[in-house]
Image: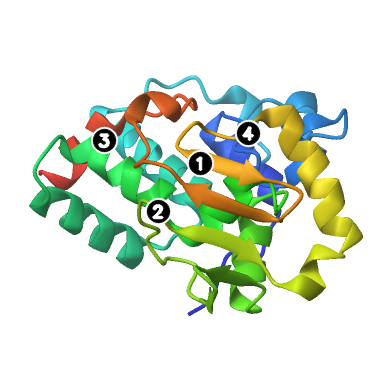
Amino acid sequence: MARYSGASCRICRRENLKLFLKGDRCYSDKCAFERRAFAPGQHGQNRFRKPSDYAVQLREKQKVKHLYGVFETQFRRFFAEAERVRGVTGATLLSMLERRLDNVVYRLGFASSRTQGRQMVRHSLVTINGHKVNIPSYQVKVGDIVSLKEKQQKSELVADNLQGAARRGVPSWLELDAKAFKGTVKALPNRDEITLPIQEQLIVELYSK
């Protein structure tokens, strides 16, 4: 299945929100969203038409899909699973997306972006409780220990990423041991710990039609 290979900054501009898809570059003056905070394309600055309710719901879904780097089929599967679980469907959906292994690798600071985290998982550089796991969508559980393989611990890239993580912080549901290059899942992520402006109820409304 093909993955989007275009300019990541165009996605942020389309969704009118900085999604931090390019790691440290998003925190610098080179960030395209900061320089051109309008939709991409020839007429990006001239689109003033009020969007319909469906368009607003669709853009919210697309924003979350791009944020976590999942395809439509994967996203529908996550939503269907969230509907089966007791609780608020929207909050459950976001919790499941947060628990993806590639996102956890990013949240712990081993990777500068979710895309880089996905690549590290795919290349078998990450272990769960000492066992190799190379599935980016793997759902971590409470008590799981996420570690980097010994060879990867000596990487200058990882060292730089951990410094960047100190700037953005590690969520409270994870515990990072930077010296041992491992992190522990202390609890399931709460909705309050997802700080980006996401209106998950719009996604629920979209799929409920």
Q: Which mark is on residue 43? A: 4
Decide if residue 11 is in sight here.
Answer: no
Q: Are marks 3 and 4 in contact (CB under 8 Å)?
A: no
Image quadrant holding the C terminus, namely top left
Q: Alpha carbon of mark 1 to alpha carbon of mark 4: how far?
A: 43 Å
Nearer mark to the viewer, of 1 and 2: 2
Q: Which mark is on residue 143? A: 2
Left of 96 or right of it: where is 119?
A: right
Q: Earlier in the sequence, mark 3 or mark 4?
A: 4
Q: Nearer the viewer, residue 169 or 77?
A: 169
Packing grade of label 2 (10 A; few <14, some 14-19, many >=20) is some
Q: Measuring 25% from the left and 32% from the top, which residue is drawn there?
A: 202
Give SS at disc 2.
loop
Tell me which amino acid carries mark 4: His
**Residue named by callout 1:** 174
Decide if residue 22 is in sight here.
Answer: yes
Give SS at disc 4.
loop
Q: Measuring 56% from the left and 38% from the top, which residue is drawn there?
A: 14
